[in-house]
C-alpha cells in the first residue's frame, strides 16, 4: 500500500509538492491533538491486519540498510501482537531524549528480534544519563513505532478509548478530496490531546523495543542542524547573507538580514523576521526559554 502522510491543512500543498509523482495517501488533521490522536486516525483508516510503521517527518536516518534490518526484526514482533518501538543505541549521555530500558530478550529459533520493554524514562538529568550509558541496556526513544492496526486499535480502546473513538468518527465523517482524506473537525476536536507514549506505550503490557544503530537524528535542536549541515573549512554552517571573520564552528541562518560574525566559536545566530536568537550551540536545549519568554 502507498505511504500515509499525516499533516495539517496548511501543509497539504507543500506535501503534494514534495511528493511529486510518487503515490501517497494524505490524512489531514483539522487541528493538532498530539501523537496519539494522529496515530489513531491512521489506525482507523486501514484494514485490521495492516502493519503500520509510524515515522516522524523531521528525522534523519543515515544508515537506511540498518533501519530496514531493524524493521524486519520489528515486523516479526508486530505479527505476534507486540507494539514495537525502535530504540537508538546511545553514544553519549544525552539529556534531550527519553530512554527505554530493555528487559527480556525476544526471538525464536535462535533469531534475536528485540527486547520486552521494562520501562520508559523521561528526559533525564545528566547524572542519570551518564549512569544509563555506563550500565548498557538503555536506548534513546526515537518515537518510531511498528504495530498491527487491530492490535493498536484494541490497545487504544483499553487505554485511551476517548481518543480512538473520536478519531474513528472523524475518519468516518471525513471528506475526501482526491488523494487526501480530511478528518472531520468536530469529531476530531473531541479527542483528548495526549502523546502515544503516555496514552498507550507506557501503559500496555506487551511493548517491545528493537535497538538500532542507524545514523539517527531527530533534528530537534540547532546543535543537530549544525552537525548535519554543509560546513566551510572552519566548520561554519551558514545560510543567507553572512560575513565571517576568525570564526569557527558556528551556525548562522541570516533570514532576510545581513549577519556579521567576528571572533566567535560554537554559537548559533538565527534570524526569523524581527526575531533574533543568539546562543552557544552547546546550550541548544535551552531554546525553549526564549519561546516561553514570548508567550
Image (tube, grey):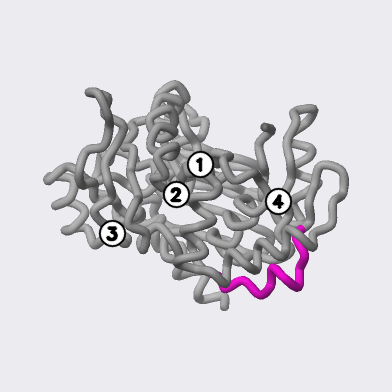
Residue under the image location 46 percent in, 44 percent down: 144
Image: 288 above or below 215? below
Give percent across and percent down for residue 221.
Answer: 46, 51
The Cα atoms of the two marked residues, 1 and 2, are separated by: 10 Å
> Residue at 72% of width from left, 71% of height from top?
187
Marks 1 and 2: CB-CB under 8 Å? Answer: yes
Mark 2 lies on residue: 143
The residue that disc 4 covers is 256
Which badge, 3 or 4, comes first in the chain's sequence?
Answer: 3
Residue at 70 percent across and 59 percent down: it is 29
Spatial separation of the CA atoms under disc 4 and disc 2? 34 Å
Pair 4/2: label in front: 2
Q: Quadrant of the C terminus?
A: bottom right
For marks 3 and 1, the one nearer the N-term is: 1
**Mark 3 or 4, closer to the camera:** 3
Asked if one can make out residue 246 in the rendered structure from this viewpoint, the answer is no
Residues in magenta, as a range:
183-193
Q: Position of residue 137 (x, y in %)?
A: 19, 43
CB atoms of marks 4 and 2 within 8 Å: no
In the image, taking residue 85 as reference, residue 116 lies left or right, namely: left
State the residue position of label 3. 121
Q: Earlier in the sequence, mark 1 or mark 2?
A: 1
Amino acid at each position: 500500500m502507498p505511504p500515509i502522510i499525516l499533516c495539517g491543512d496548511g501543509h497539504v500543498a507543500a506535501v503534494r509538492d514534495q511528493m511529486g509523482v510518487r503515490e501517497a495517501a494524505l490524512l489531514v488533521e483539522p487541528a493538532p491533538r498530539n501523537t496519539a490522536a494522529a496515530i489513531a486516525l491512521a489506525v482507523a483508516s486501514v484494514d485490521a491486519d495492516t502493519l503500520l510503521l509510524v515515522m516522524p517527518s523531521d528525522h534523519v536516518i543515515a544508515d537506511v540498510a540498518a533501519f530496514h534490518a531493524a524493521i524486519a526484526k520489528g515486523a516479526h514482533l508486530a505479527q505476534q501482537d507486540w507494539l514495537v518501538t525502535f530504540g537508538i543505541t546511545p553514544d553519549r549521555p544525552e539529556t534531550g531524549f527519553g530512554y527505554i530500558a530493555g528487559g527480556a530478550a525476544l526471538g525464536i529459533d535462535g533469531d534475536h528480534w528485540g527486547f520486552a520493554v521494562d520501562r520508559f524514562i523521561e528526559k533525564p538529568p545528566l547524572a542519570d544519563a551518564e549512569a544509563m550509558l555506563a550500565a548498557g541496556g538503555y536506548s534513546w526513544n526515537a518515537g518510531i513505532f511498528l504495530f498491527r492496526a487491530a492490535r493498536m486499535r484494541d490497545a487504544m480502546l483499553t487505554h485511551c478509548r476517548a481518543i480512538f473513538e473520536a478519531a474513528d468518527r472523524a475518519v468516518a465523517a471525513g471528506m475526501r478530496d482526491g488523494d487526501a482524506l480530511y478528518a472531520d473537525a468536530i469529531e476530531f476536536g473531541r479527542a483528548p490531546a495526549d502523546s502515544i507514549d503516555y496514552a498507550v506505550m507506557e501503559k500496555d503490557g506487551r511493548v517491545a523495543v528493537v535497538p538500532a544503530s542507524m545514523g539517527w537524528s531527530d533534528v530537534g535542536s540547532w546543535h543537530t542542524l549544525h552537525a548535519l549541515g554543509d560546513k566551510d573549512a572552519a566548520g561554519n554552517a551558514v545560510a543567507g547573507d553572512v560575513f565571517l571573520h576568525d570564526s569557527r564552528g558556528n551556525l548562522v541562518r541570516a533570514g532576510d538580514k545581513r549577519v556579521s560574525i567576528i571572533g566567535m566559536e560554537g554559537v548559533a545566530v538565527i534570524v526569523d523576521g524581527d526575531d533574533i536568537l543568539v546562543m552557544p550551540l552547546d546550550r541548544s536545549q535551552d531554546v525553549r526559554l526564549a519561546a516561553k519568554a514570548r508567550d
